[in-house]
């Protein structure tokens, strides 16, 4: 299974590259048009699977930070299920912005029946569909369905996928009361990245 891996963050890309060094990794940096353009360039002459990999927010209250959700074409999901038996099969909904509040997550779950939400899977699926390629998604949960994200967490990603530390610190300086929520969010993200690492190491064992 040859892979093009679509993700949002450099940290995700490093995890993917260490687990699957032969995969082509495309970073979107939270900019939908940028990710779509880069994926279109990457798939020229490619025959394989587009796999959306990274962290996600939970829409289902049953999902906890570190849990792994899989979605995509049935054939790919079956292979992912065998590789990651503890993963949850569920719909991963795409959005062009981070869902910051529990209320927004509940509304999206009610509207779509989705289990999780991210900013890359819908774009990767769209490109795969246009190009006649197989699609799958492996996403580790970071924030829970009932978690409200602090403002500082919403400004932490640069368009290149790196961390915008200056913007985070500026947001924290404007409102220091968000520090406990920011610490909680960081700890949850660490559990998500650990879950993603384990999942991608499992995926590496099914790559042809």
Image (cartoon, rainbow, N blue to C red):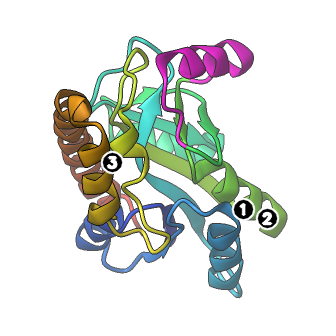
Of mark 3 and mark 2, the one earlier in the sequence is 2
* Magenta segment includes 42: no
Question: Residue at horizontal 62%, vertical 17%?
Answer: 109
Q: Are marks 3 and 1 in contact (CB under 8 Å)?
A: no
Question: Residue at horizontal 36%, vertical 55%?
Answer: 156
Q: Quadrant of residue 105?
A: top right
Magenta segment: 98-114
Mark 2 burial class by Cα count in 10 Å: few <14, some 14-19, many 20+: few
Towards the viewer: 106 or 169: 169
How far across and how far down the image is residue 186, in percent?
21, 41
Question: Residue at horizontal 27%, vertical 29%?
Answer: 65
Left or right? Give the position of 39 relative to 143: right
**C-alpha span from label 3 to label 1:** 37 Å
Mark 3 burial class by Cα count in 10 Å: few <14, some 14-19, many 20+: some
| Residue that numbered label 2 is attached to | 132
Mark 1 burial class by Cα count in 10 Å: few <14, some 14-19, many 20+: many
Towards the viewer: 181 or 114: 181
* Magenta segment includes 112: yes
Left or right? Give the position of 157 relative to 194: right
**C-alpha span from label 1 to label 2:** 6 Å
**Rendered position, 76 above or below 162:** above
Q: Secondary structure at mark 3?
A: helix
| Residue that numbered label 3 is attached to | 171
| Residue that numbered label 1 is attached to | 128
Q: Are marks 1 and 2 in contact (CB under 8 Å)?
A: yes
**C-alpha span from label 3 to label 2:** 43 Å
How far across and how far down the image is residue 23, in percent?
42, 75
């Amino acid at each position: 299974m040859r892979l093009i891996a679509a993700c949002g963050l450099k940290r995700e890309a490093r995890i993917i590259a260490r687990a699957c060094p032969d995969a082509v990794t495309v970073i979107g940096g939270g900019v939908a048009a940028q990710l779509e353009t880069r994926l279109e360039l990457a798939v020229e002459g490619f025959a394989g699977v587009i796999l959306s990999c990274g962290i996600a927010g939970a829409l289902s209250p049953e999902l906890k930070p570190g849990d792994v959700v899989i979605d995509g074409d049935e054939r790919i999901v079956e292979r992912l299920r065998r590789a990651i038996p503890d993963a949850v099969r569920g719909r991963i909904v795409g959005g062009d912005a981070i869902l910051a509040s529990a209320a927004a997550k509940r509304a999206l779950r009610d509207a779509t029946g989705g289990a999780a939400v991210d900013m890359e899977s819908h774009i990767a699926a769209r490109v795969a569909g246009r190009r006649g390629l197989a699609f799958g998604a492996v996403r580790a949960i970071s924030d829970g369905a009932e978690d409200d994200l602090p403002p500082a967490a919403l400004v932490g990603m640069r368009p290149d996928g790196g961390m915008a530390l200056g913007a985070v610190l500026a947001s924290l300086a404007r409102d220091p009361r968000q520090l406990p929520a920011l610490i909680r969010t960081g700890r949850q993200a660490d559990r998500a990245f650990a879950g993603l690492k384990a999942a991608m190491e499992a995926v590496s064992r099914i790559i042809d």
